[in-house]
Image (spheres, rainbow, N blue to C red):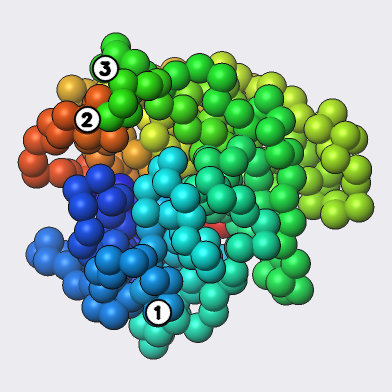
């Protein structure tokens, strides 16, 4: 099941897989003919009963080509949402696309809790922003110094206060409880001045990066800088283009919305094939990549009943938009 997709200027394509179907390949390079190879190698994708993080992924939750041209892989460090993290499991793993080798690992242990679930990643110059969907909050990493800190812990803007909905139904875990995914999606404005973020069930908020980037700003002052920006439906993923338009997958109505900088909202496309669309990606080719991940049909979100219909498809839609220069390589 393809959950995340990212591409390079040269046309290389990488995908990641969630753990809803059991152990298997977590990151792969996707060839033009549809074949896949474990990436960066089979060792990193090895299945281990004890989830030992040494040299292998624990639970990949995202990946993205960084502004440095490397592939950044988000290892949540937990086998699944709601499951305890593995010691030394939460990491950012950086792979050189020139050599296909891991060249750096940023440990996130010091700023994550037992039930943290590191979710998504965005870049703003030397700073890396991450969301924690398990113990709600944001993480800020300075790539230059390696300094890592938390921000907006349990702030109302990072806490899921309503259930997730897909195809008109509330998503429920195998115990029948409502699925709540805290701070999840995030986007940086093209000028780097704002970070937009939200729980998976909305609403979307934003904060000036000048405040978020200041490690000396007291937590209370930072919390007061958060602005509720727009009410949004349940989504699996977003993307932002060079004009500041945010694309959001509305999983309740199987459509892709555009959120304009002036808060206007319109429908880009609605199609019954867009089942639980996940992390969107705007490639340098002018296409919006749309994984129809069907997560709402997985046992973890469908009350314990596995109802995924194969094949899982990544759709492409020409939008003639460019990615922000401060994000892609």
Which of the labelled discs sits on residue 55, or is there none? 1
Determine contact: label 1, label 3, CB under 8 Å: no
Residue toward you, 306 or 207: 306
| Residue 243 seen from this side | no
Query: Which residue does the numbered mark 2 point to in the structure image?
Result: 304
Near-viewer residue (51 or 70)? 51
Q: Quadrant of residue 28?
A: bottom left
Q: Which residue is drawn at 61% across and 50% down?
A: 113
Q: Mark 3 points at which residue?
A: 167
Residue 239 drawn at (x, y percent): 47, 41
Residue farthest to the bottom, as pictured? 99
Question: As drawn, which residue projects farthest toward the top?
Answer: 168
Q: In this view, does 66 lie to the left or right of 326?
A: left
Q: How far apart are marks 2 and 1 (CA)?
A: 31 Å
Residue displayed at 49% across by 71% down: 93
Task: Give how far across and how far down residue 118 sits, in percent.
Answer: 52, 51
The secondary structure type at the circle numbered 2 is loop
Label 3 neighbour load within 10 Å: few <14, some 14-19, many 20+: some
What residue do we see at 47% from left, 33% from top?
181
Q: What element carries label 1?
A: loop
Indicate which disc, 1 or 3, sits on the residue closer to the N terminus.
1
* Label 2, label 3: how far apart the Cα atoms are: 17 Å
């Amino acid at each position: 099941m393809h959950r995340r997709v990212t591409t390079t200027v040269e046309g290389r394509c990488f995908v990641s897989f969630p753990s809803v179907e059991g152990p298997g390949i977590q990151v792969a390079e996707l060839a033009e003919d549809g074949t896949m190879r474990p990436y960066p190698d089979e060792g990193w994708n090895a299945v281990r009963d004890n989830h030992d993080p040494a040299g292998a992924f624990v639970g990949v939750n995202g990946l993205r080509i960084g502004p440095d041209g490397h592939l950044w892989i988000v290892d949540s460090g937990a086998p699944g949402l709601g499951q305890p993290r593995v010691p030394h499991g939460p990491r950012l793993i950086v792979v050189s696309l020139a050599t296909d080798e891991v060249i750096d690992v940023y440990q996130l242990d010091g700023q994550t809790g037992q039930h943290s679930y590191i979710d998504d990643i965005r870049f703003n110059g030397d700073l890396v922003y991450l969301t924690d969907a398990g113990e709600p909050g944001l993480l800020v990493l300075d790539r230059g110094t390696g300094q890592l800190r938390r921000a907006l812990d349990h702030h109302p803007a990072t806490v899921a206060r309503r259930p997730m909905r897909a195809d008109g139904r509330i998503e429920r875990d195998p115990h029948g409880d409502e699925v709540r995914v805290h701070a999840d999606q995030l986007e940086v404005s093209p000028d780097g001045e704002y970070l937009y973020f939200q729980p998976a069930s909305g609403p979307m908020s934003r904060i000036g990066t000048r405040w978020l980037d200041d490690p000396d700003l007291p937590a209370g002052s930072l919390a007061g800088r958060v602005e509720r920006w727009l009410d949004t439906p349940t989504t699996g993923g977003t993307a932002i283009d060079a004009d500041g338009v945010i694309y959001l997958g509305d999983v309740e109505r199987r459509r892709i919305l555009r959120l304009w900088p002036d808060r206007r909202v319109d429908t880009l496309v609605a199609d019954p094939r867009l089942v639980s669309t996940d992390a969107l990606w705007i490639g340098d080719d002018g296409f919006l990549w749309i994984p129809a991940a069907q997560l709402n049909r997985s046992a973890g979100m469908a009350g314990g009943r596995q109802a995924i219909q194969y094949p899982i498809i990544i759709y492409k839609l020409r939008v003639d938009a460019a990615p922000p220069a401060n994000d892609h390589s």
